[in-house]
Image (cartoon, rainbow, N blue to C red):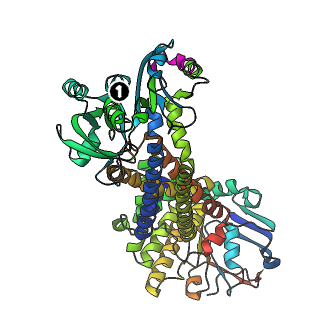
């Protein structure tokens, strides 16, 4: 009998809309699902289906209109901006489509950046950042600026930055969207290893079936509704 | 430390834009510093004036003379220590463009009253002994290449004719604020000539200089002097040297006000330029700020980044401008030495430069900081790519 996995993310009756001038644009409707610890989930859907919005809500960088999101033991919909910032720093690792590295910082400094919000010493921060860069195979590029690196390398630095704080969940928004096929494969392989070998819970938004194929669970969003397909990844 | 590293690198990341902004700030601070120094030099005579020296002139106007007979009467007033006298001569050296102040004075008492005009004992002795002798300030003598023993001719404007003088001494200022562009000769030389060519104009002076035994007696002595000559043909007006000089400045008050206004306009213009630069910079970095907020950095960190970057740029420009102000002021002062005998960049001007730079930096950073803090993370991240 398969061991019951602990639920790490609980989403209940989630609604979200955006306001543009006098217009209210509903984006998500009554979303409810769970994510188990150590899961690798892909969120798919056409453009405008609300998948990035849902990811932002799960990661605590946007506010829900209605509903509840519990990550671990914390209902993040009840947290203030300051509490959310603190929570994100400790619990979420981010990987974005355009890498979002700070251009004036070297690779090692970019990876070290989130550690400045921890109580680690300067030496410890440097050791952690070097280790993270080693894990993504970029120890030899630590003194290079993002502008001196390829897209694939920048995304690997972004992954190192995402995992350096050992977060509860990793969120990735189209992590291969700006990469060529070879680099995309490399990044997806790395995410697979993080999930399989380190047990990291990963939530990835993508519209690329090849990327989604690497996830264990696939969920689809369409026009703001979650498709009732809770099966294992059919891809 | 990481925040400081980012703000310093951000400040110089776009080298052309930062360089041009810093250059603009440097030029603005240079202009501001020079204009403030012009205003300071305008007031230099007031600053250098002593509160224990009094000036007595005709109550109607400075252009009306006083009789020389007042000298003895003033000396007898209680509290008076020394009395000297003189006249504005208004002579022209070769051409009218060669303006410098020239006075005839009673030389011995005048030099005693003005210890800040320092002459060597030999030069002082030679000057006192020669009725046609004159002394000139160091800057004036240097400007025209005069040497001891040279004969100089001034063309009289108030007192017509060509007047020959022999340079007997070159004084230097005891203090930085001492005017070294003046020309003094013997009142007796003028008076003897007037006796011959225009007797009604003889035995008259333009002003009396008085020193008092104690500075706190100044107002009492001034009142006593004016009371002594009340209801005479030439009533007097006595005031401290500082007040007398301030009266002159007041005549050109509109010019000083205009210069002050221009100096503030310069700061206002550069404030708008730096605000525009910071607005562009922040707009470009909104994605960086969003990612920092995503990672858990707060509004305080973003504020430090934007205000810090603005301060780094403006203070770099300010220090460059301040460094340039010194040679520029030296060149300016040298060129216009006769109009601005004391042209020195004051500590107050340097403090105002720094205050202006901090004001510019803060003003320029307020709106971009507000925008960067208020924008939602999701909105900020959408601007990347």
x and y percentages locating residue A220 in the rendered image: 70, 83
Asked if the magenta segment contains residue B213, the reply would be: yes
Q: What residue sits 47% from the left and 22% below the top?
A: B70
The relative height of residue B147 versus residue B365 in the rendered view (above or below) is: above
Residue span colored magenta: B211-221
Q: Quadrant of residue B201?
A: top left
Can residue A105 be seen from the camera position used here? no
Q: Chain for mark 1? A: B
Label 1 neighbour load within 10 Å: few <14, some 14-19, many 20+: many
Q: Nearer the viewer, residue A192 or A64?
A: A64
Give the prevailing secondary structure in the magenta stretch.
helix
Can residue A99 be seen from the camera position used here? yes
Q: Quadrant of residue B179?
A: top left
**According to the image, label 1 marks what residue?**
B106
Q: What residue sits 48% from the left and 47% below the top?
A: B39
The relative height of residue B30 versus residue A41 in the rendered view (above or below) is: above
x and y percentages locating residue B231 in the rendered image: 61, 24
x and y percentages locating residue A189 in the rendered image: 48, 77
Asked if the magenta segment contains residue B338, the reply would be: no
Judging from the image, what secondary structure is the residue with disc 1 in? Answer: loop
The relative height of residue A33 versus residue B256 in the rendered view (above or below) is: below
x and y percentages locating residue B105 in the rendered image: 36, 30
Q: Nearer the viewer, residue A38 or A50?
A: A50
Q: What residue sits 66% from the left and 81% below the top?
A: A232
The relative height of residue A134 versus residue B328 in the rendered view (above or below) is: below
């Amino acid at each position: 009998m398969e061991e019951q996995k602990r639920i790490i993310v609980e989403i209940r009756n989630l609604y979200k809309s955006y306001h543009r001038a006098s217009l209210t644009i509903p984006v998500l409707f009554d979303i409810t699902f769970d994510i188990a610890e150590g899961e690798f989930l892909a969120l798919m859907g056409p453009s405008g289906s609300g998948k990035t919005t849902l990811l932002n809500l799960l990661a605590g960088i946007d506010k829900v209109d209605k509903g509840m999101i519990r990550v671990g033991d914390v209902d993040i919909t009840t947290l203030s901006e300051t509490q959310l910032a603190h929570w994100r720093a400790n619990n979420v690792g981010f990987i974005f489509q355009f890498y979002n590295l700070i251009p004036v910082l070297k690779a090692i400094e970019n990876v070290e950046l989130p550690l400045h919000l921890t109580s680690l010493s300067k030496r410890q921060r440097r050791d952690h950042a070097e280790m993270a860069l080693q894990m993504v195979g970029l120890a030899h590029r630590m003194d290079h600026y993002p502008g001196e690196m390829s897209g694939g390398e920048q995304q690997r630095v972004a992954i190192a930055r995402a995992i350096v704080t050992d977060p509860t969940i990793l969120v990735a928004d189209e992590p291969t969207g700006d990469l060529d096929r070879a680099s995309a494969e490399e990044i997806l392989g790395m995410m697979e290893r993080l999930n399989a070998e380190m047990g990291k819970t990963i939530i990835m938004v993508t519209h690329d079936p090849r990327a989604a194929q690497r996830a264990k669970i696939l969920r689809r969003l369409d026009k703001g509704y979650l498709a009732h397909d809770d099966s294992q990844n059919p891809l | 430390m990481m925040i400081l590293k980012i703000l310093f690198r951000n400040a110089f990341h776009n080298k052309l834009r930062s360089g041009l902004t810093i250059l603009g700030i440097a030029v603005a601070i240079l202009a501001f510093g020079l204009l403030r120094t012009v205003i300071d030099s305008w007031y230099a005579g007031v600053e250098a004036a002593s509160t224990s020296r009094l000036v007595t002139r005709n109550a109607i106007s400075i252009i009306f003379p006083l009789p020389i007979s007042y000298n003895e009467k003033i000396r007898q007033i209680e509290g008076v220590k020394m009395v000297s006298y003189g006249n504005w001569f208004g002579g022209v050296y070769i051409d009218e463009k060669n303006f410098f102040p020239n006075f005839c004075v009673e030389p011995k008492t005048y030099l005693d009253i003005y210890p800040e005009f320092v002459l060597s004992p030999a030069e002082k002795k030679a000057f006192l002994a020669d009725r046609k002798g004159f002394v000139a300030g160091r800057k004036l003598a240097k400007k025209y290449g005069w040497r001891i023993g040279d004969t100089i001719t001034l063309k009289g404007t108030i007192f017509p004719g060509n007047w020959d003088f022999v340079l007997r001494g070159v004084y230097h200022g005891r203090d930085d604020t001492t005017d070294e562009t003046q020309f003094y000769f013997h009142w007796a030389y003028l008076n003897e000539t007037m006796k011959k060519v225009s007797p009604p104009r003889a035995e008259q002076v333009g002003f009396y200089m008085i020193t008092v035994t104690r500075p706190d007696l100044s107002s009492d002595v001034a009142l006593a002097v004016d009371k002594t000559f009340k209801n005479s043909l030439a009533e007097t007006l006595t005031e401290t040297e500082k007040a007398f000089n301030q009266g002159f400045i007041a005549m050109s008050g509109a010019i000083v006000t205009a210069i002050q206004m221009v100096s503030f306009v310069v700061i206002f213009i550069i404030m708008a330029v730096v605000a525009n630069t910071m607005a562009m910079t922040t707009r470009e970095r909104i994605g960086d700020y969003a990612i920092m907020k995503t990672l858990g950095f707060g509004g305080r960190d973003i504020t430090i980044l934007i205000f810090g970057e603005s301060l780094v740029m403006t203070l770099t420009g300010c220090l460059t401008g301040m460094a340039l102000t010194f040679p520029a002021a030296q060149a300016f002062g040298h060129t216009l030495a006769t109009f601005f005998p004391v042209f020195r960049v004051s500590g107050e001007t340097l403090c105002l430069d720094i205050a202006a730079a901090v004001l510019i930096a803060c003003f320029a950073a307020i709106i971009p900081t507000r925008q960067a803090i208020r924008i939602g993370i999701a909105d900020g991240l959408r601007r990347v790519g």
